[in-house]
Structure formats: structure tokens, C-alpha cells
């Protein structure tokens, strides 16, 4: 359970995040949407304990994030950034094994690595040099790394942050990554994802937070939130909403 | 991009531990060879006999060989080993910290600061000091100069409590240039005798090794060697990136400060004792990664061992190549390391071009 109150982050004299209250429940993917510069990634970093807000507070399971020890936090909270470039060449399974660093000394690192690679669908990349993989494959190996970091953590205790995980990926890779995250959420984990694709968000998220200029525009389930009116308020462009005849969901297309 | 060009071994036939033992054995063999090379050539079994003689494990051969080995060659070879090991280890740590295979302690201003300290002492300080202190003054000033410039670089690179790696590089370049300019100013003011001293100091030599110098260098290097195993986790996490390492629970600022200070202390002492010896800090980690990949559990100890194996051999070569004169060891490492590095760079560039 993640909770935050009166979060304010100011950079260069501009308030890039200003959120009076927020609460994120486990069990479904919580999506953060909004145009570039809306403060999505800043919010994610604050909630993940990567940076402290200038004022306000965030809690993980009732304990202020500032009071968590880095090691304890790393043993139950993982963050998948948009893109990672390795400083030195490593094989895919070596990258995944780095996810076990917070658990050093605990049993079964090889099992954790193998299980995480299977779950992320990259078991076949074992032995490959990470730098020679495609962007989508690299991102899925990184997903396996964060899954390995959470391996052995009770689902209800594990928290997964995805910071624009699917930007710059092709369709199959986008869906593969979101499907794995959604499955983790269904198993009881808390999953928070910053996304750009409205339809991808509608498909995989339980709850959406729509932001603009560091502030909340709207929050709610995708079907209620993704209306042409709210999207216009956040992004400033006109959209049309059409029902998905097959799945009963909604699709948004430019008007 | 070919796999071999990025030095990822396909299979791992043996563990890191076995490979390290083999590397250590190779370093010891190199040591025996190096001790036998010089104006008087002594075969490895003769070297071994002389080394074991004081322990009562072998009988010393009649003749001057024992004295040559123990008084002339052992101190400088031990200093070469120590300096080589420190430079290799420090280079591996700096490359891991900067996430850049071209980084070395020189980037932090350690070498430039050491040179400034030494040159200042040679030109200005020595005449002001009482005679008994003079033998150690140059090394001491080099050590202080190295530490001082490194601290300045770190201080400038710090912003809102965080040390920015990119700022560290820029600050390093700036302070390297400033220290270089100040060094030039002192050289400009130096007389002929001082110029000679400066020239030989900057080219590096382990000929000045005495038990006192060895002990002082060892003491300054010890913290780095003891702490190195504790840096492995953080450096491995840093391969992923700074943000990634932080979310894996690595105390990243502590890692930066700790690593840089320990490196400056150890390399400052190595530079003070042996002058400027280039390329070992870059070449040793490269060789280590070529052998078994980039995992720092392997790269750190392997780089130390490779450096400790290479420098005594370089010193031995420096003793005989232009006998009866002696080449400065730093000149030799630059002469050998430069082309090696160029080859590496060209190969990597072609690989990146996909040719």
C-alpha cells in the first residue's frame, strides 16, 4: 500500500509536482498518464523512494519512505527504467543475476535468475551478449532483472515501478512487458507504471492517474477516466472515444 | 558488432577462484624471471635458491648472487609489484565507477597533483628543508599533491550533496590542466640540476625502493586492498547505471567518496614512490575483462594481479634494454601500453562500425 500527502517538488523555480493526496492499492496496475513534463516520472521517483520531495510525505505500508533503509527497500521494491545502457558488456543472465544483489547471501540465486527469465520470456536469450540484443529484448531482460529482485518476496509485499517501460518498443514487446506486470499485480503485488499509450493503459491498468503541469487532472478506472473531455484537458488535443466491439473496452483515437 | 569484440566469454569452464590462482602463479613466475634479469643474469632456479636461503630451506650459492638479488633487485621488484598491483586495481575501480573503460586514476588529478607536488618540492622546497628530511621530501610532496588535487576535483564535482560523475570528469580535466600549468611554471624556474631530477621523476622509476619506501607505500595501499572486496557489489550494480544501482539499495554517494579517497591514497603513494607510470591502470583491467568478462568479482583481483605481474617484468626490461644505462620504467610502459591501447581502440571502432 502506497500513500502520499501534499507532495511538492520544485525545480528551477517551477513546481514540477504538486499533489495533495494519493493512495495506491495492490492488486491492479496503477497507471500514470500525461503529456511530457507533466511530472509523471518525478512522481514515480518520489513514490519509489529514489528522491525526497521538497515537502510532503510518502509512505510504503504505513512507514515514511525516508525511514526505509536502502537495503530493506531494495528487497521488496524494484524499478524498471525506460532504458538502461550497460557500462560494460554482460551476458543476459549476468544482467538478470544483478537483480539478486540486495539478497546477497540468500539461497538459490540461479533458480531465481532462471525463473525470472522464464517469466519475462527471455529464457532463450541465455548466453547472449546484452549489447547485441534488440531494444525490446534488452528491456525484457531488464524486466527479468527486476522480477529476480522481487523473487521470493511475498506477492503482497512486493512493489514494482515501471518508468515508461514500453516507450520505443514495438507492439509485441509492449504487450509482453505489460502482460507480465499485470500478472504480477493480479497475484497481489503493487504495480505502478508511467505510460504514454492511452489504449495500452486502458487495456492493462486498474486505475489511472491523469496528470498535467505537475497536478492531478483526473483519477479513476480507465473506462470512466478516458473521456475526450479529460484527455483534452490533460493533453490539449481533441480525441474521439469508440467502443471496442470485441472486448467491451474503450479505444481513443485522434478526432 | 561481433561478440568477441565485446569480450563476453561464451562458456565458463572454471570458476573465478581457479583462474585467479593460475594468474597468481603466473605473477610469481614473472617475479622469479624478473629477479634473474639484469647486468648479471641468474636462472630462475638460482633465484629461487637465493630467495629460500635465508629461511634455511636451501643453501646459497657461493658468489655475489645473493647480495645482488636481496639488496639490488628484491626491493625494486617488490615496489614494482606493489605499484603495479595498486595501479591495476585502482584503474579497474575507476573504470567501474565512471562506467567507462578509458577511465584511470589520472582523471581524478592524482598523477598531475603528484607531479605538481614533486616538482614544487624539487624546485622550491628542498632547499628550505633540513637535510635529514630531504630524501623523503619529494615523495611526501607528491603524495600530498595527489590527495589535494583529488579532493579539489571531488569538491567541485559535488552538487546538492551528490557527486556527479560527469562533473567529476570535467573537474578532473580542468584541475589536470591547472596542475600541469603550475608544474610548467616551476619547471620554467628550475635550474639545470633540478631539471634533470624533474625529468627522471616524471618518467618514473622503482630504483629508489628502500624498505622504508616499501613500507610507507604498502601502508597507504592497504586500505584500498582491504576495502576492494566491499566495493564489488556496488561496482557490479553500477554496470547497470547509477539509477539502477541506487534502486538495488547501493549507497551510491558513499561508494563514490570511499572509492575515490582510497584510490587517491593508494595511487598517490604509488606515484610518490615510483613517479609517473602510465597505462598499467588502463591495460590491466582491459586484459582482465578480455579474459573472463566484466564481473567485478573477477576484474578487481585479476587487474591487481596482472598489474603486479606486468610491472616487475617491465622493470626488468628497463634494466637490460639499454644496459649499462637504465630506461625509466614509465617510459617503457608508455612505449608498450600506447600501441596496445591503440590496437584495442581500433579493433573496438571497427567492431562498432560493423566492419
Image (spheres, coloured by chain):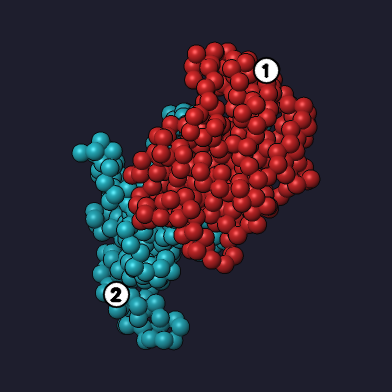
Is residue B257 visible from the viewing direction of this image?
A: no
Residue A231 at x, y percent in the picture: 59, 19
Chain with colour cyan in the figure: B
Depth check, front residue: A88 or B22:
A88
Residue B90 at x, y percent in the picture: 48, 51
Which residue is rendered at x = 44% and y = 60% of the image?
B298
Residue A127 at x, y percent in the picture: 35, 56
Residue B104 at x, y percent in the picture: 44, 44
Check the residue under mark 1 and report the chain it is in. A
Q: From the image, state whether disc 2 or disc 1 is nearer to you.
A: 1
Which residue is rendered at x = 38% and y = 86% of the image?
B58
Which residue is rendered at x = 48% and y = 42% of the image?
A177
What residue is pinned by disc 1? A14
**SS under mark 1:** strand
Quadrant of the rendering where the C terminus of chain B is positioned: top left
Which residue is rendered at x = 54% and y = 13% of the image?
A237
What residue is pinned by disc 2? B44
Amino acid at each position: 500500500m502506497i500513500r502520499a500527502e501534499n507532495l511538492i517538488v520544485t525545480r528551477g523555480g517551477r513546481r514540477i509536482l504538486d499533489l495533495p493526496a494519493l493512495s495506491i492499492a495492490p492488486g491492479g496496475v496503477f497507471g500514470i498518464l500525461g503529456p511530457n513534463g507533466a511530472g509523471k516520472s518525478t512522481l514515480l521517483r518520489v513514490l519509489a523512494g529514489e528522491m525526497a520531495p521538497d515537502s510532503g510525505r510518502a509512505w510504503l505500508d504505513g512507514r515514511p519512505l525516508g525511514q526505509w533503509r536502502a537495503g530493506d527497500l531494495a528487497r521488496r521494491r524494484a524499478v524498471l527504467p525506460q532504458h538502461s545502457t550497460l557500462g560494460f558488456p554482460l551476458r543476459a543472465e549476468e544482467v538478470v543475476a544483478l537483480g539478486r544483489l540486495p539478497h546477497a547471501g540468500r539461497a538459490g540465486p540461479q533458480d531465481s535468475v532462471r525463473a525470472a527469465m522464464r517469466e519475462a520470456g527471455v529464457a532463450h536469450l541465455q548466453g547472449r551478449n546484452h549489447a547485441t540484443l534488440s531494444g525490446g529484448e534488452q528491456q525484457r531482460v531488464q524486466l527479468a532483472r527486476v522480477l529476480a529482485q522481487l523473487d521470493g518476496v511475498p506477492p503482497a509485499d512486493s512493489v514494482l515501478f515501471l518508468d515508461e517501460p514500453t516507450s520505443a518498443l514495438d507492439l509485441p514487446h509492449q504487450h509482453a512487458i505489460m502482460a507480465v506486470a499485470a500478472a504480477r499485480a493480479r497475484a497481489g503485488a503493487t504495480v505502478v507504471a508511467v505510460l504514454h499509450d492511452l489504449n495500452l493503459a486502458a487495456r492493462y491498468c486498474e486505475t489511472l492517474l491523469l496528470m498535467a503541469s505537475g497536478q492531478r487532472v483526473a483519477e479513476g478506472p480507465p473506462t470512466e477516466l478516458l473521456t475526450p473531455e479529460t484527455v483534452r484537458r490533460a493533453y490539449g488535443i481533441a480525441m474521439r472515444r469508440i467502443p471496442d466491439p470485441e472486448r467491451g473496452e474503450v479505444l481513443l483515437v485522434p478526432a | 558488432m561481433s561478440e568477441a569484440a565485446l569480450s563476453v566469454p561464451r562458456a565458463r569452464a572454471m570458476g573465478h577462484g581457479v583462474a585467479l590462482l593460475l594468474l597468481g602463479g603466473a605473477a610469481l613466475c614473472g617475479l622469479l624471471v624478473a629477479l634473474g634479469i639484469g647486468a648479471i643474469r641468474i636462472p630462475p632456479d638460482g633465484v629461487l635458491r637465493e630467495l629460500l636461503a635465508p629461511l634455511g630451506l636451501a643453501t646459497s650459492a657461493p658468489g655475489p648472487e645473493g647480495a645482488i638479488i636481496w639488496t639490488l633487485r628484491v626491493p625494486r621488484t617488490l615496489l614494482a609489484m606493489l605499484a603495479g598491483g595498486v595501479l591495476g586495481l585502482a584503474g579497474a575501480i575507476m573504470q567501474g565507477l565512471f562506467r567507462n573503460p578509458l577511465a584511470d586514476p589520472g582523471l581524478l588529478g592524482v598523477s598531475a597533483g603528484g607531479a605538481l607536488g614533486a616538482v614544487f618540492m624539487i624546485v622550491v622546497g628542498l632547499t628550505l628543508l633540513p637535510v635529514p628530511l630531504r630524501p623523503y621530501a619529494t615523495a611526501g610532496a607528491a603524495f600530498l599533491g595527489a590527495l589535494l588535487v583529488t579532493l579539489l576535483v571531488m569538491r567541485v564535482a559535488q552538487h546538492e550533496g551528490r557527486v556527479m560523475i560527469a562533473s567529476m570528469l570535467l573537474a578532473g580535466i580542468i584541475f589536470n590542466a591547472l596542475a600541469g600549468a603550475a608544474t610548467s611554471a616551476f619547471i620554467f624556474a628550475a635550474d639545470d640540476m633540478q631539471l634533470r631530477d624533474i625529468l627522471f621523476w616524471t618518467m618514473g622509476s622503482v630504483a629508489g625502493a628502500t624498505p622504508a619506501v616499501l613500507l610507507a607505500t604498502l601502508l597507504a595501499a592497504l586500505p584500498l586492498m582491504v576495502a576492494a572486496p566491499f566495493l564489488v557489489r556496488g561496482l557490479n550494480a553500477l554496470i547497470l547505471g547509477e539509477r539502477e544501482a541506487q534502486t538495488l539499495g547501493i549507497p551510491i554517494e558513499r561508494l563514490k567518496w570511499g572509492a575515490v579517497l582510497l584510490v587517491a591514497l593508494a595511487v598517490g603513494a604509488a606515484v610518490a614512490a615510483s613517479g609517473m607510470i602510465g597505462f598499467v591502470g588502463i591495460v590491466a583491467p582491459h586484459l582482465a575483462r578480455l579474459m573472463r568478462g566484466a564481473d567485478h568479482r573477477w576484474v578487481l583481483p585479476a587487474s591487481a594481479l596482472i598489474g603486479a605481474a606486468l610491472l616487475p617484468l617491465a622493470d626488468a626490461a628497463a634494466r637490460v634494454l639499454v644496459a649499462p644505462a637504465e630506461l625509466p620504467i614509465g617510459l617503457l610502459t608508455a612505449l608498450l601500453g600506447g600501441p596496445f591501447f591503440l590496437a584495442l581502440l581500433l579493433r573496438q571502432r571497427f567492431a562498432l562500425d560493423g566492419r
